[in-house]
Image: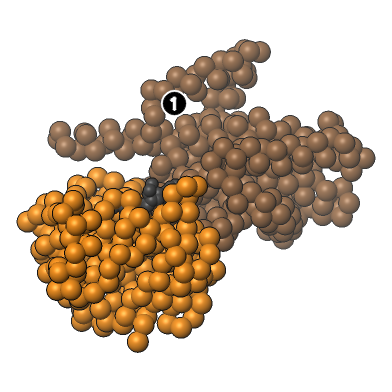
Chain colours: A orange, B brown
Amino acid sequence: MSLLVTKNLVKYFGDTHAVDHVDFTVKEREVLALIGSNGAGKTTLVNLISGLFPPDSGQILFRGQDVTHESVHGRISAGIARSFQLVNLFDQLSALDNVALTIFSREGKTRKLASLASADHAVWDEALEILRLFGLEGKAQMLAGGVSQGERKLLDVAIAYALRPKLLFLDEPTSGVSTREKTPIMDTVTSVVRSRGISAAIIEHDMDVVFNYSDRIVAMHQGAILADGTPDEIRRNEAVTTTLIGTTGPR
Amino acid sequence: MSTPAVTASANAREAGSVRTVLRWAVPVAVLLLVVPWIVPPYTAILLTYGLVMAIGALGFNLLLGYTGLLSFGHSAYFGVGAYVVALMVKYLGVGSMELFLFGAIIGSVIVTAVFGWVCVRYTRIFFSILTLALSQVLWSLAFKFFWVTGGTDGLRVPTPSLLVGLVTGQGDKTDFMSHAYYHYVLVVFFAAVALMWVIVNSPFGKALQAIRDNETRAEFVGVQIWRYRFVAFLVSGVFTGLAGALWVPLNGLTTPDIIHWSFSGEIVFMTVLGGFRSFAGPIVGAVVFNYLKTYAVGYTVYWQLLLGAVLVALVLSLPTGIVGTAGRLAARWKKVS
Ligand SMILES: Nc1ncnc2c1ncn2[C@@H]1O[C@H](COP(=O)(O)OP(=O)(O)OP(=O)(O)O)[C@@H](O)[C@H]1O
Ligand SMILES: [Mg+2]
C-alpha cells in the first residue's frame, strides 16, 4: 500500500527543470533514501510535497487523498512533516522551547493565551524526552541560535519528528555532522521510524549511510527519476553507478 | 515516559519563573501604591501619565518584541480609545470611567480588527508603512469631521466618576488626579501587566515568538501565521486603546495630535528606550520617556531637538535598552561578588 504517490509532478524554474514529470511513491513502513547529485531536484521534490510552493502541474496523493492544493497546515495535520537542508530554527528560543512549541502546535494548544505554557508538564516532559533521543538534552536551555551547526541540524530533525508524522522527510539530516556522529543519528532516526510504524524519506549524499539504513533507494538526475529499487539493485544499476556514485561518492 | 527527574526539573522551572517575577513585582507594586503619600502631587500625576503610556507601550511591544512586527500606527488605537471616551461624553453624557473603558475596548476592537485584517498579510517595512498610512487616514478624519471631533480644538473631557459613581471628582482636581485617579490607573496597570505577562508566557505567546524568529518554520510546525498575527494585532491595539481611554480624563482634552504618526513614533521610541527584548522594557521606557519629555518641554522651546538628541545618545549607548543593560550589569555584578 502506498502512503504517498506523486503523478507527473512538474516544477520548472525558468529553464531549470527542477522536477520533471516525476512519479514518486513512498510505501507504508519503509525507510527510503532519495539520492542524486547536486541540483538533481531532491529538495524541490520535497518542497512540492510538503507545500512550500505549488507544482506547475501534476498531482500529490497522500493516503489516497489529493493534497496537491492543501495548505501547509493541512498537510501537517494529515501527517507530512519535514526537516530542512538549510537549518530553520527559532533562534531566540531555547532548544527545549523549539521542541515544546512544536508539540503545543501539534496538540492544537497554541490557541490558548490565558494559561502559562510552563504549567503543561506533559508537553515539557515529552520535549525533553525528544531532545534526549537526539542527544541534545545537555543543550535544552541554550538558545537554538547558540549551539553548534551539527546540533542545529539535529534540532531541525527533532522538531520535524516532534510533529509525530506518518511520513517524515529529512533533507540531508547528517550533513555538517561529523562522521562519528552520523551512525548514532541514523540509528536513532531509523529505529524510531520503525518502532512507530511510520515512513521516512531521507535525502542523503553519504552512500555508506544510504546503503546501510534504507529499505529502498530512489535516484534522481536532472529532475527525473533515474532508478528505483532495493539497495542491492541500486548497487548493481549501471546508470546510477556511472552518473551518481562515481561522481559523488561518500563525503 | 516522564521520569521523576524530568518532572522535578519542570516543576522547578515553573516555580522559578513565577517566584523570580514576584520577587521583583511585589516590592515595586508596594512602592507604587504608596507613591502619592511620599511625593508631591505633580510628580504623582506625571507618574500616572507614565503608567498610562506603559500600558500602551506594553501592547505595542506584543507586536514588536514578541511577534517581530514594527507598527508605526499605534497612535491610531490610542486615539480611538481617547476619542471614544470624548464622544461618549459629548453625545451620551456618560461620566463613568468603567463605561469609558468598556466603550474604548469595543471601539478599539472594531478598529484594530479592520486595520489588522489589512496589515497582517505584510511584514517588515511593508507592515510598518501600512500601519502608518492607516493611522494617518484616521488622523485626517479627526481633522476633517470637525463638527463631530472638534477639529484641531479637540474635545474636552471632564473629570470622570470612578467605581460606578462611588468616587467622584467634585473636589480639587489635582488632589483627585494624584490620589484617586492615580490608584485607579495603577490597578488597571497591574491588571494589564499581569494579563500581558500571562499572554506572552502562554502557548500562544510561544507561537508568536516562533513566528518572529522564523516565519517559514513556524508555518512548518503547523502555526497558521496570519491568524496568530491577527490576534496579536488585536490584543496589542486594545491595550493601546485602553491606554488612550485612561489618558484622556487625565489630560482633560483630546486633539488630533495624539493620532498623528509622530505620536506613534513616541510609542516606538519609549519601547526601544526601555528595551523591546524584555517584558519590562516598555514599562520602564514609557515612564522614563515621559519624565524626559516633560523636563525637556519645560527646559527649552527646542525640546524636540533636545529630546531627540538625548534619546539617540541613550539608544546608541544602551542598545538593549535600559532594562537589558540593567540586567547585564546585574549579572556581571553577581559574578564578581
Ligand atoms: N527557489 C528556486 N528558484 C530557482 N531555482 C531553484 C530554486 N530551488 C531550486 N532551484 C534549482 O533547481 C534545481 C534543483 O535544485 P534542488 O535544490 O532541488 O537540488 P537538490 O537535488 O536538492 O541538490 P543538493 O544536493 O545540492 O541539495 C537546481 O538547479 C537549483 O538551482
Ligand atoms: Mg537539496
The outermost residue toward the front is: A238
Q: Quadrant of residue A244?
A: bottom left
Out of A201 and A109, give the one closest to the viewer: A201
Q: Quadrant of residue A139?
A: bottom left
The outermost residue toward the right is: B147
Q: Is residue A13 left or right of residue A102?
A: right
Q: Is residue A32 left or right of residue A185?
A: right
Callout 1 crowding tier (Cα within 10 Å): few <14, some 14–19, many ≥20: some
Out of B19 and B315, give the one closest to the viewer: B315
Determine the residue positioned at 43% across, 60% down.
A20
Q: Is residue A114 visible?
A: no
Above-or-below relation of B316 to B193: above
Above-or-below relation of B187 to B3: above
Q: Is residue B135 left or right of residue A65?
A: right
Residue A58 placement (x, y as % from top left): 51, 68
* Chain to which the residue tagged by mark 1 belongs: B
Q: Looking at the picture, which amino acid does disc 1 mark? A: Val
Determine the residue positioned at 44% across, 65% down.
A21
Out of A101 and A81, give the one closest to the viewer: A81
Determine the residue positioned at 27% across, 32% down.
B329
Q: Quadrant of residue B54?
A: top right
